[in-house]
Image (tube, rainbow, N blue to C red):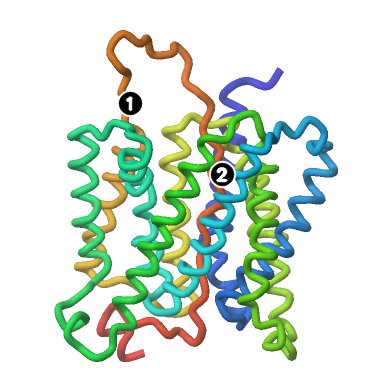
Amino acid sequence: MTSKSTLENKGTAQLTAAMVLSGTLGIFVVESGASPFNVVFFRVLFGALALGAYVVARGWFRGHGFTPRKLGLAVLGGVFIVFNWVLLFQSYENTSISVATVVYHTQPFYVVLLGALLFRERLTAAKAGWIVVAFAGLMLVSGIRPADFTGGDTTYLLGIGQALLAALLYGLSTLVTKRITGVRPHLIALVQVLVGIPLLLPFADLGAMRGTGSGWGWLVGLGLIHTGLMYVLMYSAYAKLPTAKIAVLAFTYPAVAMVADWAVYGHHIGLVQALGVPLIVAASLKVTLAKPVTPAGVKRPTTAPAPVAAPAPRTAAHAPEAASRPATPAASEV
């Protein structure tokens, strides 16, 4: 029988690999040369083929657990996820992979705030305080200057807003997905990517794909590697790891994305912006790992529940021709 420590070590390796893949996805998107809507369309198309083949091979369509209500929730979560990707891809285009990734990583705070607003989940003073700390870090990382509001070029400001809105949509998808029980996360993810095919077809410019050439290889990779393989690794790891380790390992994604942005495209955040990163990381861990509030008279379970299956993983995005504003003087010179 496999020991608990062996299973946890395997889960750690699987989730780390999944987050590394997630952090490198931006390179695939950029190298494909496709527009954000086209990238998302072909990602969900090839991703659905990969996930569908995996689910069929495992025989999980039998006893799938979907009811009309659960299927409706999965579809709704898919709508949020698909447009979350489009906005994030556009944010990379208008800022940089590094900046947009960290801004996008404010998702946990939206989950808490939306839960309080929409479902009357209790927002403690401690969580509220950490959310304030996180958004202070956000202001530092974003590098927004007064000139961004008064100048004629608002592209960078728009990109920050797109990353924030993408995080908001991801938070909505998370809250919806949390309410689906008794269904394998792979099946939920398959529904979410399938939803994206008809949803994005009217927006995709298929004629622009003529002459794509080697770009097709990058798009296929997005579906097979960064959706199919990454989802399988991630969901397998979730079943083996405690919530605390999942929360910590999740930060592998933005770290790898920032390194990839610097190594491949020469983008990196400035010193003042970097000061905001630990604020967001610390606040995110505090909020994510906070003990659930137990109402008076209700006993807390003696065993921790299994980690909630996350919706589609966070993704990097599209930034053709390094369109982002350099974060440092050195980058400006380059």
Of tags 2 and 1, the one toward the viewer is 1
Q: Quadrant of the C terminus?
A: bottom left
> Which residue sits furthest left?
146
Which percent across, then down, holds residue 35? Answer: 58, 80
User: Residue 262's mark?
Assistant: none
Left/right placement of residue 206 relative to residue 86 reads: right
Residue 221 place in picture, x, y as percent? 70, 66
- To which residue does mark 1 refer? 291
**Few, some or many C-alpha atoms within 10 Å of disc 1 (few <14, some 14-19, many ≥20)?**
few
- Residue at (35, 33) in percent of width and height: 289
Checking the image for residue 15, the label placed there is 2
Query: Which residue is at the front of the view, 226 or 42?
Result: 42
Secondary structure of the residue carrying tag 2 is helix
Quadrant in the picture for residue 153: bottom left
Type of amino acid at the residue the image marks with label 1: Lys
| In the rendered image, the vertical position of residue 26 relative to residue 79, given as above or below | below
| Mark toward the start of the polypeptide (2 vs 1) | 2
Residue drawn at (44%, 66%) of the image: 259
Front one among 203 and 133 = 203
Side of 207 where 166 appears, left or right: left
Residue 319's x, y, as percent?
Answer: 49, 79
Q: Is residue 2 above or below residue 132?
A: above
**Does residue 66 appear in the picture of this structure?**
yes
Residue 110, given in percent of the width and then of the height, sits at 35, 49
Q: Quadrant of the N terminus?
A: top right
Q: Residues within 10 Å of mark 2 (few under 14, many from 20)?
A: many
Residue at 66% across, 57% down? 195
At x 42%, y 40%, the residue is 247
